[in-house]
Amino acid sequence: MKVDEGEIVAIVGPNGSGKSTLLKSILGFARLFQGKVFYYGKDITGIASDRAVSMGAGYVPQMNNIFPNLTISENLDMGAYHRKGRASVKAGMREIFEMFPELEVRKNALAENLSGGERQMLAIARAMMAQPKVLLLDEPLASLSPKPVSVILSKLEKIRETGTAIIIVEQSVKKALSVSSRGYVLVEGACAMEGEANSLFAEESSKQRYLGLEAKGY
Amino acid sequence: MTVNWAQILFNSVITGSIYLLGAVGLSVTYGLSGFPNFAHAEFITLGAFIGYFVAEQLGLGLPAALIVAFLVTGIVGFLCYRGVFQPLAKRGASIIHLMVASIALGFILRYSIGAAWSWHPLYFTTTWSAFDVGPLRVTGLWLWLIFVAVGLAFIMHLILTRTKIGKAIRATSSNPELALASGINIDRVIWITWFVGGGLAAIAGIFRGADTQIWPMTGWDIILPMFAVAILGGIGNFYGAIAAAFVIGLAENVGVVALIAVGLSTEYRMAIPFLILIITLIVKPQWLAMLFRRA
């Protein structure tokens, strides 16, 4: 499994296939029993989570992905914890607000008062404040209505254009693959299939076999 | 019976100020470390004895006593966490294991303090000026206490809302895993919290000791109402703890009036915080914490 600079890669699969665990083990949140993690050719297997962030890995968990008792600005400040100097943090915040103008208008609001879509935007923006080279997103579209989903997907495209690689774990297979260049199908902790995003589920039988889906809108 | 309500209110602020200083550290370390630290009582006691040593035995006065006691007890608090609780937590100790370890550590500290100084009560010899302000009887010590408690609470507020480490403390308190995912060194955050919590407990100890007496049970005598404050304000909630300290202080002082009115001993005053706590937990748990979400 690999991801290149400026590329979005989707990891899909049925419930319980180990998608979230895979992300957590890359970042040192879960114990890795076998396999290795390489980052720009360097073995970082079992790295401490805070070191992974300082090396350039951004992570957005599926649940509890904001600090609810902090304002939007303070959440972004925390994302920039490793950045040196107040000027650098301010510059980072300006860039983030250009990308997420929805957040700037409410920058002094407590994060707990945001809608589902705004929370997800804040979670991604917080991770982006660390200037990650690779962004790992755990089901960023879960529980969102159609409009915020399309907003989030367009933000991911913009992030990709900056050169940041994105690994997206998602249940909404079609939506995840719509912005990805490649995809991996995870089944019971192992990679069952991989390929170009637009041809990954070209055969109806593969959808049924790996995702248990028959509907066209998988 | 004629009641001087202005004095009752003022006394409530004094009681609340002591609880504020003691309970803020207890609450925040509880929130970040995930267990109630009963040895916090001995941080209060140690602070009182160090304050006595600096102010009385070295004759350096109250301000020097406050600073030295804050620093020394803060370091002791940090060492207790780093040397005892953190290794236990890393080995998977449960909240019960950690709580029992804190009781054991408290015993060790208490008897060490008794052996080093004395089990006989000690008294500050400084005579504080007393004067009347309208219906109020006020002493210089009480004014110092209120000034220091309010001043430190304000400084803590500035640290928590304006500084990187303060925001990291609030972030770690609300979501430790996300704090880690943000690159925050949560061990360092917890160490700093234990240092500050120990230091604030020491300040509470000095004022409690100067107002009453100092002996190895000084901290234990007031730790239980402080737990009531921490729970009422919401575990780990700084602003909730401040509000709860004054609520409990008021309840205790009004309760004393009520106890006297019904002919009961004022010894029962220690039960009042828990009565308030039980009623609150039954009727509306964490209502104070909900009012102060920016903790």
Image: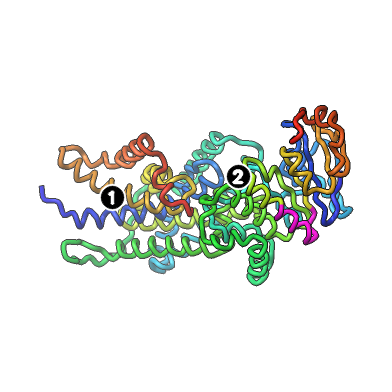
Give yes or no for residue A83 being in the magenta stretch.
no
Residue type at the position of mark 1: Leu
Find disc 1 in the rendering and name its residue: B250
Image: B108 above or below B16? above
In the rendered image, residue B210, in percent from the top left (x then y), is placed at 33, 58
Pointers 2 and 1 in contact (CB under 8 A)? no
Cα separation between marks 2 and 1: 37 Å
Residue at image mark 2: A64
Question: Going 22% across and 45% down the picture, which residue do you hit?
Answer: B256
SS class, disc 1? helix
In the displayed structure image, the side of residue A95 where residue A195 appears, left or right? right
Q: Does the magenta stretch include residue A164?
A: yes
Identify which amino acid the numbered label 2 is placed on: Asn
Q: Mark 2 — on which chain does it sit?
A: A
User: Magenta part mainly helix, strand or loop?
Assistant: helix
Question: Residue at the spot x=47%, y=42% of the render?
Answer: B38
Element at label 2: loop
- In this rendering, the answer to whether B14 lies above or below B274 is below
On whether disc 2 and disc 1 are found on a single subunit, the reply is no
Magenta highlight range: A154-165
